Amino acid sequence: MLPVAISSLLLLSAAQAAKPTWECRTAPDGATWECFKDGLPAAAGPLDQPVTTAPVAEKSSPAVADKPSAAVQEEPVIAPAIRPAHIAAPVEKQPAPVVTAKEPIRPPAPVQAKPVVPTTVATTSPDQSLFGPRIDRGLNWSQCSVASGGTPTPRGTAAISNEEAQTHISSDAAEIRRNDEESIFSGNVEVIRGSQVIEANEIRYNNKTDNLHAQGDVYYQEPGLRISGTSATFDMENHQGQIEAVEYRLPYRMARGSADKAEIQNKDQSRFDGISYTTCRPGSNSWVLRADTMDIDQATGRGEARNVILALSDMPVFYLPYISFPIDDRRKTGMLAPSMGQSDETGTDISMPYYLNLAPNYDATITPRVMSKRGLMLAGELRYLTGDHSGIITGEILPDDDEAPKGQNKTRGAFSIKGRGWLTQNISVDANINHVSDDEYLEDFGGSLAVSSTRQMERRADITYHGEYWSLLGRVQHFQSLDETLASTSRAYNRLPQVRLALNKPDQLYGLTYHLNAEYAWFDRSIGVRGHRYDLHPGLSLPMSRSWGFITPKITARYTGYQLEDEAIGATDDPDRFLGTLSIDSGLYFDRQANWFGSSVTQTIEPRAFYLLIPREDQDDQPIFDTSKLSFSFANLFRENRFNGADRVGDANQLTLAVTSRTLGATGKELLRASIGSIIYFRDRTEQLPGGRNLDEETSAIVAEMGARLTENWSTRASGQWDPHNSDHTDKSAFQLHYRDEERRILNLAYRFTRDVSEQTDFSGRLPLFDHLTLVGRWNYSLRYNQTMEGFGGIEYDGCCYVARAVVRNYVNKAGEEANTGIFLQIEFKGLGSVGSDIITLLDRGIFGYAQNE
């Protein structure tokens, strides 16, 4: 950013001089001309002397000479500072016509002249009282980030481009030397053009050589960049120049630095000597990046630096003799920041990724990973992106695992292919293919309970046609089982293939909505029954709604047929089923205005009734390919089938009664939501999965859920399932209390219980202490197994321009197994990068609300 910014400054100054504009007017004494080229004085003299100026289109104009007159003013003329306005520019380096005035009157206005912008001559230096020196004006470095009010805007205006804007110059005095074609502005010189501001004690411009020299307390400002120096010289025609003793600020990044000299070599290339970069506040060098020389080429988007040193508190800790890097969005091949960590499973773990920029639309990363207990692993990632497709291909291999038991293959690895895209405007594709070498691979290298507990690894490819009201899916799907204790008959079926049609077309005849779900699939597995399944499920519904309520009657019919292989002895190989369904969903809406702790709110009561009728039919001769029972929840009170697949349709004659109440703030924001509901059964439910018992209770469990925003910082959620027919009553419950404030103090308290499955407590938080020191931690404990499932604790130290993190983690891959311990360290240099383990991902996953966007 720094080299690009400084180069842009020098190049822009040169570019603006490429097309000069002229203006001439009578001086205040009425006896001399004042002429300006690109806003800089060009010459001065008495009115009866020829003066170089722009052509004037007027019949009574004086005679025009072929070239400027040789007559000159012998002594320099001192004139008060003015702010010139632009007019149409003549061709570069061609002499303008000369207008000779016989009387001391103001010459006619030049063609296409813009009005002069009046200004007050600057007599005092700019205000430097706000947040220190001028270069830090308006930047609050104490906040460790950009001020909440945004980055201060330069005094210039950005309403039009800098090339089109007028140039305004003010100073205490201006000296015009016509013999030398030189203009000198001195004393609090300020040049404003568009959003750019240049200030100096003195600015000299030579019209003959097209050179500009600024001397003494030179300052330049534009959006996103501020530069100060002792002197600056620009050769406008050749696009060359240099600034001495550079100090710079990048307000949008809250970064700063310095350079002994910045030299522009041409419009694309520049060189910097003795350059430094940091995001630490002025006066602090907690970390700084220094280089002896840096060369920038904007045409190629590349930079090169030599003798690069990263220093912490002025102590060098890292050195590179040479580094090449990108200076814009164009990617650059090279080393990425390494990561380091330690755990019981891998020992000391160090990764050194190397990035390969293969083409504008695809790249790769190769990562050698050294594990003291396991050996050397090589990982790779290939990413691609086109106008219609994107994807990631990853793979890793450990040729010789030092921890592998005797007799087992020591070569271990994994690969994954994920991609999606559009073949045409209506046809999309999606693939997710994964493979690991052995069942324990994810336990040893997965790194988290969620990953290591995966029992079935999916391999899937989809192609879908999207119509206006319908879609057609084609799929092949295969599973790799990773749990050797899982019975063969309990392993997932492969779909080779599956074809599914879905249609939902509203506002048809008499307001009806047409529904259709149709599917064909071939289910395959190495052990057990396999075969074809056909499922056809059409339906009609009539939605009717008003502001005070709604009612939606719906009828459907469902046919499911099979052609089976390897079925049990005596079982039919072509079972089928045909059922009809009737449902009526209805609800009312009541609201009132109320007062909640002094604030106006809207309270609602929303009762809902859902009736479902499905006849009973014996389905025991049908296999179970992909069907399971839905978990009981408030949302599932209103489903038409208590199973989630086509192999079973639950018989039903039932009525769901529920009510929801909401409290809405004045802006419509939901402050409180509470719901409760239950099902009344008018007959027993006999259709169950194999091994399931008939259900004869007259009512279901009572399901309730609640969510509330207690204050701006406190919120809570709770849910429960209470069974009046069970002596223990509670089947499922969950509670969560969450706190987060503007200082990112975070507290999460949670309890989760599911009968005969799990019972856990979960505490996590982030607590700022003092002097930028913060504690982070999580404790997820299983009351069922009396074991910590995952626990970590650590510290964050935010030094404004860097963050240091250290975390100790204790976790298990499976409940009941021995715990693993890991130690992770990370240093993040703001505005530069990070070194160490990826602790941020661990904290984002483990502490709800830690992520900035939550």
Image (cartoon, helix red, strand yellow):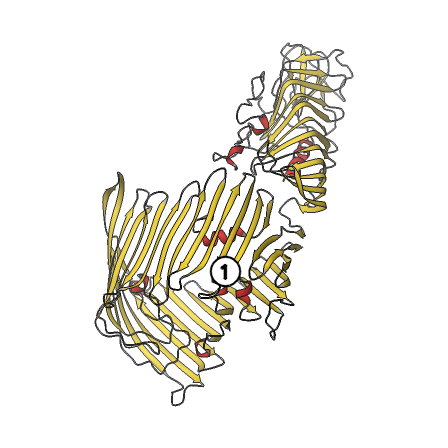
* Quarter occupied by residue 312: top right
Q: In the rendered view, would you say 515 is above or below 367?
A: below
Decide if residue 786 is in sight here.
yes
From the top left corner, tell me how far across and down residue 369 is, in percent.
Answer: 63, 59
From the top left corner, tell me how far across and down residue 674 is, in percent.
Answer: 28, 53
From the top left corner, tell me how far across and down residue 657 is, in percent.
Answer: 23, 62
Residue located farthest toward the right when viewing the structure as drawn = 70
Decide if residue 146 is in sight here.
no
From the top left corner, tell me how far across and down residue 192 is, in percent.
Answer: 60, 26
Is 713 on the left-hand or right-hand side of 340?
left
x 48%, y 75%: residue: 494
355 and 407: which is toward the camera: 407
Residue located farthest toward the bottom when viewing the structure as drawn = 570
Q: In the rendered view, would you say 306 is above or below 559?
A: above
x 38%, y 87%: residue: 572
> How many badges with numbers are in the image?
1
* Quarter occupied by residue 469: bottom left
492 and 46: which is toward the camera: 492
For badge 1, the amino acid type reads: Ser
Disc 1 secondary structure class: loop
Query: How many residues crowd around disc 1 within 10 Å: few (fewer than 14), some, or many (20 or more)?
Result: some
Q: Quadrant of the N terminus?
A: top right
660 and 436: which is toward the camera: 436
Is 79 on the left-hand or right-hand side of 734?
right
Q: In the rendered view, would you say 620 is above or below 343?
A: below
- For disc 1, the marked residue is 448
* Quarter occupied by residue 608: bottom left
Is 827 on the left-hand or right-hand side of 49?
left
